[in-house]
Image: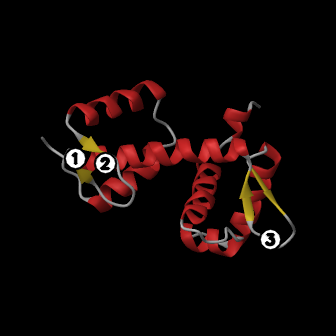
Amino acid sequence: MTERNAMTMSLEDYLEGVYMLILAKKPARVRDIAASLGVKTPSVVYGIAALKRLGYVSQEPYGSVELTPAGLQHAKDILRKHKTLTTFFVFIGSSEEAAEADACKFEHAISHETLTAIERFLERNKVKVGVGRLFQSRK
């Protein structure tokens, strides 16, 4: 099994959850990851163990989860997909709630080619991709 095949949707969600907590300047503890993702703590423990095996995170016993350089890059890529898709869906008329939920699903399957095409479309339409809410600037 290759590393790419080993990353499941839920593992990508855990990685993104760790990154979001770090961005919010909060410790990425197992219970905080579980709370932020709305999942049970044992699921996070299992997921973090898998991410450790893949080399994406490190964690001292009972400590906060830290991203490795490879984990940080992968988490940034996932978040970029998520933000781009959310922005795109809202731009074409979806509610923010629906856009957010759909982006969570699509971010795991979208090809690099399609993501790049969406990013170019947003740029041509002068739509900036933002965190948490849509920022549009039209000239």
Looking at numbered disc 2 in the image, what kind of residue is underneath it? Thr
Q: For residue 87, which numbered disc appears in the image?
A: 2
Q: Which secondary structure lies at badge 2?
A: helix
**Tag 1: residue type?**
Phe
Which residue is under mark 1?
91
Q: Position of residue 126 (x, y in %)?
A: 22, 39
Task: State yes or no: discs 1 and 2 in contact (Cβ < 8 Å).
Answer: yes
Going from the N terminus, do you reach mark 2 or mark 3 first?
Answer: 3
Q: CA distance from mark 3 to mark 1?
A: 40 Å
Q: Position of residue 50 (x, y in %)?
A: 77, 51
> Height in image: 29 above or below 100?
below
Q: Amino acid at mark 3?
A: Gly
Q: Give the labeled residue for mark 3.
A: 63
Who is closer to the viewer here, 29 or 123?
Answer: 123
- Contact between marks 2 and 3 (CB within 8 A): the answer is no
Quadrant containing the C terminus is top left
The numbered mark at residue 73 is none
User: Mark 1 or mark 3, which is nearer the start of the sequence?
Assistant: 3
Crowd class of label 1 (few under 14; some 14 to 19; many from 20; radius 10 Å): some
The residue depicted at 27 percent of the width and 34 percent of the height is 123
Tell me the residue at 71%/39% (across/down).
6
Give the residue at x 73% y 59%. Answer: 66
Q: Is residue 29 above or below residue 57?
A: below
